[in-house]
Amino acid sequence: MPDPVPLIAVLEDHPAQSEWMQRILSDAGYVCQIFSEGSALLTTLRARTPFSLLLLDWELPGISGMEVLRWIRVNCSEDMPVIFVTNRTLESDLVAGLNNGADDYICKPCQPAELLARIGAQLRRHRPSVSPDTNFTLGVFSVDMAKRQIRLRDEPIALTPKEFDLAILFLRHPWRLLSRDDLSALVWNREVPSASRTLDTHLSNVRKKLHFGPSTGTLLCASYALGYRLELLPSTDQAVVT
């Protein structure tokens, strides 16, 4: 039986912007429901409408997007991803959105490919998980978990054990923001402090050895106040579990 078509709620009070988003999402095969006011979205959420993902503007008449987000995180399932799509571009706004429970944050104006890539990444992240031992591919990379080997266009890459663990975090979770604390905990079990130069050295090695950059359709982006995220060029945003 095929998977159900994702139902996406869009909270956006600007008609031209909401129409643009609805057209992009519909053309990509999603079902989209538009809300121009936060109160209307909250009413629908109280009725337990099974949205797969929410796209929220921040600045709205009446209830703001941030207030909607806080209500969602108290009253709705944590499995429902929420992405801010907003004109607010200060890093402090990004931090506030993520700290209040947003899964991602996109600054307007955004390109259709980026919007769809971010949505696809969150839907993959929140679907039922597969075994961490399952082999997978991402664009030009293929991963054999049993052999602990990453291949780039069928060529094996020589990695140390910790470099492999670090690389897997980014390849398995594209577009996911990983803080230095996350990396310290998940790769070194906090034995290496998050501020250690060891972490920077391993990040640099992984970036060089996997050739993260335009040649592989990948970008390892850093925000030193927040962490690191593997971003994919549109043609590469395809993760396939095998």
Image (cartoon, rainbow, N blue to C red):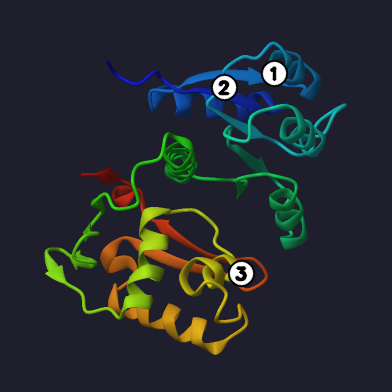
Q: Which of marks 2 and 3 is nearer the N terminus?
A: 2
Q: Name the residue under label 2.
A: 51
Disc 2/disc 3 C-alpha distance (Å): 31 Å
| Secondary structure type for disc 1 | helix
Amino acid at pointer 3: Asp
- Element at label 3: helix
**Residue at 15% over, 71% down:** 156
Query: 120 or 172, which is in the foreground?
Result: 172
Looking at the image, which residue is at 62% across and 30% down? 17
Give the residue at mark 1.
45
Mark 1 neighbour class, 10 Å CA radius: few under 14, some 14 to 19, many 20 or more:
some
Name the spot of residue 167 as percent of width and height, x first: 36, 68
Direction from residue 142 to residue 186 in the image, left or right: right
- Coordinates of residue 241 in the picture (x, y in percent): 26, 44
Tell me the SS state at disc 2.
loop
Mark 2 and mark 1 in contact (Cβ < 8 Å)?
A: yes
Q: Which amino acid does label 1 sit on?
A: Leu
Q: In this view, does 197 lie above or below 115?
A: below
Between circles 2 and 3, the one closer to the viewer is 3
Return the residue nearer the eye: 188 or 72.
Answer: 188
Q: Which mark is residue 122?
A: none
Where does label 3 land, which residue?
Answer: 181
**Identity of the residue drawn at 58% across and 36% down:** 81
Q: How far apart are marks 3 and 1 (CA)?
A: 33 Å
Circle nearer the viewer, 3 or 1: 3
Tag 2: amino acid: Phe
Asked which quadrant contains residue 73, the reply is: top right
Please report the residue visible at 82 percent of the width from the left and 35 percent of the height from the top. Answer: 67
Q: Quick one: 126 or 83, which is closer to the camera?
A: 126
Quadrant housing the C terminus: top left
Categorize mark 2 by other alpha carbons within 10 Å: few (<14), some (14-19), many (20+): some
> Relative to 34, is 105 above or below?
below
